[in-house]
Amino acid sequence: MKYARNWLDLLLVLALTGSMAGCGSKQEELAGDTETTAAVQEEEEDDASPEDYLKETDDPDDDKPIDLENLVIGTQATAPAAASTAESAATVQTTASSAASGQTSAASSAAAQQTDAPEQQAAVKPSDTQAAQSSAQPAATQAAQTVTQTTAQAATQAPTQPPTEPPTEPPTEPPTEAPTEPIDPEDVVMAVIDLNKMGIDGSGAAVNGNVITITQAGTYIVSGYLGDGMIEVSTTEKVKLKLNGVDITNSTGPAVLVTDAKRLTMTLIEGTVNSLTGGSAAHDGAIFSNDTLEIKGAGTLYVNGTVEHGISSDDDIVVKNGDIYVNAVKTGMMANDDITVSGGTLHVTGSTNGMKSKGTMHIAGGSLWVTGGPKETKSGLYSATTFTVTGGDIYVIGCDASAPDAATSTQCALAVKFVPSLAGGSSACISSGGVALFDAYSDMAYNTVFICSPDIWDGMEFNVSANGVDYGVFNTAGMMTNVTAGS
């Protein structure tokens, strides 16, 4: 019986080991699938479209005032989550081991009881020698068969059958607290940057003369004054700059330069006023990005392009909200691929173009007041391909304006072209029913006033006047109406 139990225990151990090995292979399979899915998602994020920008949801408290004294910086933010995960894993492993031990003991006990039963029955037989001898061999054979059958049955069923006795420890139950979701690397506060001292509290950024370079993913809170320098972002990951009262001027380049990043999100902290001034021929904007640039928040931002453009990106520009004022010696806002605006208030002035996209433009919300320069070949607002308007109010003064695409837009627009052009300092008014839709004024000469707003509809009657001269009454016709005021 001793040897039978030893063989039984050995078989149970082998069965459990195989089962655990199978689970390990399955876990590795799942981990591989998870890594593949994450890689696909990351690749999709690299190819975000204007539709993706409009679907994104943001933390409503992301731009709220910051308590710097109680701020958790860097990897400390993820420590509680990691500890909780490790503790939960240890608890599950301990409970699983206890359950497996209980099943093994129960199976061994059941097999021992079944094996001992034939011996006890043989001991109480009548003391008839011949009968005992004749019955001894079948009983031994039956006992051996019983041991073999019991051993095989226990080895097969023990891992899956519940113990015959209640376990000494409570069964495994789901965690009482919901698991903590991992923190997005973009939302981990890596450092607090004080421009007044050129000091960095945290990691992921370094000071090199009058330049602060960010080289890791994460959130960087910036405040203070920098008289002649810049912030440069150089990483392949997402970076968030929280402007907490910033004033940067650069006489030889951009105030903010994105050499490389998956996306730079510039968050304007509520109640703060921020100013960025600079530019160069090599990097043609006070804010210049080689990749997607996103601006949002409840604060105020002034951008002054002293050499070329105000805000410039070789990729996309996304404006979600904020009170933004842009002034530039060339184009106020320039994007190579797309400009998407879904909220906020923009006052954009450029001495050549007001807003220009070499690709597409999508306006889904917000209020845009755009002024372009006097050159006939330039525009107050220009989109090289599809210009889609599904919300917001757009008011443009310049020498031309792109028409919204009738197939993709949901708002009507009208454009009035004055002949001859109006000189700098001229005022023009577009009204309907005695109520002004747009009072236009520019220090630069212009010939076109453009409006796209929910206040305009097909068949609406409107009046045009400029510098005290009444040009008459007109009617809108369809999604886009173009009229000429003057000879």
Image: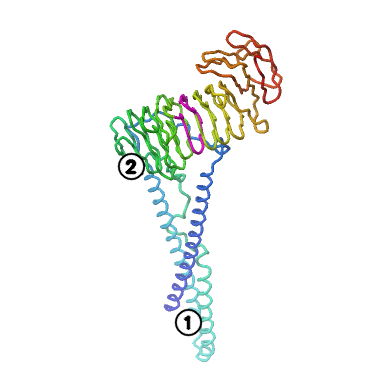
Q: Residues within 10 Å of mark 2 (few under 14, many from 20)?
A: some
Q: How many marks?
A: 2
Q: Earlier in the sequence, mark 1 or mark 2?
A: 1
Tell me, yes or no, whether the two marked residues, 1 and 2, touch with CB atoms within 8 Å.
no
Q: Viewer-proximal residue, 27 or 276? A: 276
Q: Would residue 39 appear left or right of 90 to someone viewing this image?
A: right
Q: Is residue 74 above or below residue 469?
A: below
Mark 1 = which residue? 123
Residue appearing at x 54%, y 76% in the figure:
149
How far apart are the alpha carbons under marks 1 and 2? 81 Å
Is 356 a magenta residue?
no
Q: Give the answer, above or below, for where 473 lies relative to 78.
A: above
| Residue 296 location (% of width, % of height) | 47, 31
Residue type at mark 1?
Ala
Quadrant of the snapshot with the C terminus:
top right
The residue type indicated by label 2 comes to Ser
Which element carries disc 1, helix, strand or loop? helix
Residue on which the image places disc 2: 203
**The N terminus sits in image quarter:** bottom left
Q: Residues within 10 Å of mark 1 (few under 14, many from 20)?
A: few
Residue 486 location, x and y as percent?
A: 65, 14
Image spot of residue 228 (x, y percent): 33, 30
Q: Is residue 76 above or below residue 168?
A: above
Judged from the image, the secondary structure of the residue bearing numbered disc 2 is loop
- The answer to whether 382 appears left or right of 472 in the picture is left
Which segment is the magenta one?
308-332
> Farthest residue in the left direction?
197
Q: Residue furthest top?
A: 468
- Compare residues 113 and 455 and report the one nearer the observer: 455
Tell me what residue is drawn at x 29 percent, y 34 percent.
198
